[in-house]
Image (cartoon, rainbow, N blue to C red):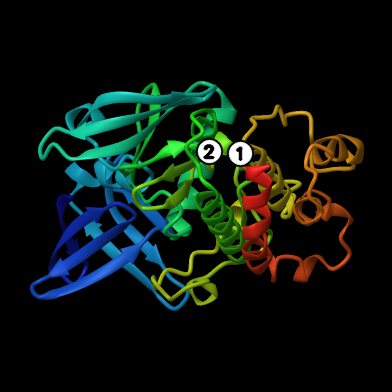
């Protein structure tokens, strides 16, 4: 938490506290909270000279409020609101404790806070290529909006000279590809994973988001909590619509009504997540890790059928085909209504399949 002295044009003195994706303006016992769920806060900046910012104007649908800032901290305050949550630098806050995984655009690490020794999960993005910046923005924007028990909880993010950083609550569990390799999943755990994955996909679809990259290594399973966490939102897309707190799938958690339509997706396939779930379920059921890169959400009917022929169980095959061939389903709006019940009905079938 970082504190700056602000002064309203009315000469009332305010303190400003910058917390993750919100700021708190405090005057005596009154606190005003302003939430920012995007990279572009609805602010206009005014400079008192070439290099220093003297005030900002907060734009709202109903009103416009002007705040005067001490010029010595104006630039730092703007950087915070534009993504530099800690202007002192992340190296003054965290140190890397362990590398969890490495990818093309960056790495996932376990980090320890220098002041209270708390462990968190960090994602470090490289800079220098436009796709890395886009992936970083996609992840931050998706997880700032999506609030679900099966998704990572984002704390803050940093934009620095050579890398961008995202800090989450500590991510517990093991990726599903490792779980399959180690043969640690029983039928009840597979059922639970399938149900939770369908629920979180339904939630994302309701909120207008598509993950676009659901696969074994992006799903962590915590055996102690018997819960999954879906990670890696760098390829996520937003359906072309305006999302407000009134549309929330669970509850009205924020007063922010930012128009997220400004970063809508390009050529999004909103039902690809269900297709990817089908590939994940196939691998969970067969306990085999398949190379699914060449099986696309399109008309790869022959490749899909080659997979399904490995399963000699009609009910399981029918369920998987429903997900994998959804691009051929005519009644897509009602497609997912009964998926959870269908997974429950597969319980006995999976026991028999695994025991044969």
Confirm whether residue 17 shows in the render.
Answer: yes
Secondary structure beneath dot 1 equals loop
Q: Is residue 197 above or below residue 121?
A: below
Q: Is residue 56 left or right of residue 126?
A: left
Q: Is residue 217 left or right of residue 116?
A: right
Q: Determine which residue is flagged by label 1.
A: 215
Whether residue 51 appears in this view of the structure is no
Pinpoint residue 220: horizontal percent, then vertical percent.
46, 41
Query: According to the image, label 2 marks what residue?
Result: 218
Q: In the depicted view, which residue is nearer to us: 61 or 209?
A: 209
Which of these two is toward me, 30 or 175?
Answer: 175
Percent from the top left, x then y, of residue 49?
29, 42
The front one of 171 and 53 is 171
Give the residue displayed 70% in from the left and 65% down from the top.
336
In the displayed structure, 120 sits above or below 275; it is above
Q: Residues within 10 Å of mark 1 (few under 14, many from 20)?
A: many
Classify residue 229 as left or right of residue 166. right
Q: Residues within 10 Å of mark 2 (few under 14, many from 20)?
A: some
Q: Are marks 1 and 2 in contact (CB under 8 Å)?
A: yes
**Which residue is at a point 52% across and 56% down the rendered structure image?**
192
Q: Residue 11 in the image: x percent, y percent?
A: 14, 68
Tell me what residue is drawn at x 44 percent, y 60 percent.
Answer: 147
**Corner quadrant of residue 294:** top right
Q: Quadrant of the C terminus?
A: top right
């Amino acid at each position: 938490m970082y504190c700056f002295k602000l002064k309203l044009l009315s000469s009332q003195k305010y303190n400003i506290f910058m917390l993750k994706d919100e700021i708190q303006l405090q005057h005596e016992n009154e606190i005003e909270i302003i939430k920012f769920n995007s990279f572009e806060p609805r602010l206009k900046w005014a400079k008192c000279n070439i290099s220093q910012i003297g005030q900002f104007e907060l734009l709202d649908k109903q009103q416009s409020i002007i705040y005067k800032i001490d010029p010595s901290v104006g630039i730092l305050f703007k950087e915070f609101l534009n993504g530099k949550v800690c202007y002192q630098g992340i190296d003054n806050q965290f140190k890397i404790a362990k590398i969890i995984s490495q990818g093309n655009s960056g790495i996932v690490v376990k980090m320890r806070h220098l002041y209270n020794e708390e462990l968190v999960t960090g994602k470090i993005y490289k800079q220098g290529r436009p796709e890395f910046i886009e992936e970083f923005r996609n992840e931050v924007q998706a997880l700032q909006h999506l609030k679900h028990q099966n998704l990572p909880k984002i704390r803050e993010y940093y934009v620095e000279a050579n890398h961008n950083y995202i800090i989450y609550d500590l991510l517990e569990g093991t990726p599903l590809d490792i779980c399959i390799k180690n043969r640690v999943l029983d039928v009840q755990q597979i059922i639970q994973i399938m149900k939770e994955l369908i629920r979180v996909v339904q939630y994302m679809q309701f909120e207008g988001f598509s993950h676009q990259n659901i696969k074994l290594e992006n799903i962590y399973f915590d055996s102690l909590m018997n819960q999954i966490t879906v990670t890696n939102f760098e390829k996520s897309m937003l359906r072309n619509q305006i999302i407000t707190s009134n549309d929330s799938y669970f509850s009205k958690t924020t007063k922010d009504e930012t128009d997220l339509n400004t970063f809508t997706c390009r050529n999004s396939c909103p039902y690809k997540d269900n297709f990817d779930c089908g590939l994940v379920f196939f691998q969970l059921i067969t306990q085999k890790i398949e190379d699914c890169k060449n099986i696309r959400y399109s008309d790869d009917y022959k490749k899909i059928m080659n997979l399904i022929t490995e399963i000699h169980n009609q009910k399981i095959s029918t369920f998987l085909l429903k997900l994998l061939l959804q691009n051929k389903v005519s009644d897509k709006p009602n497609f997912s209504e009964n998926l959870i019940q269908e997974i429950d009905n597969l319980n006995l079938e999976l026991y028999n399949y695994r025991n044969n």
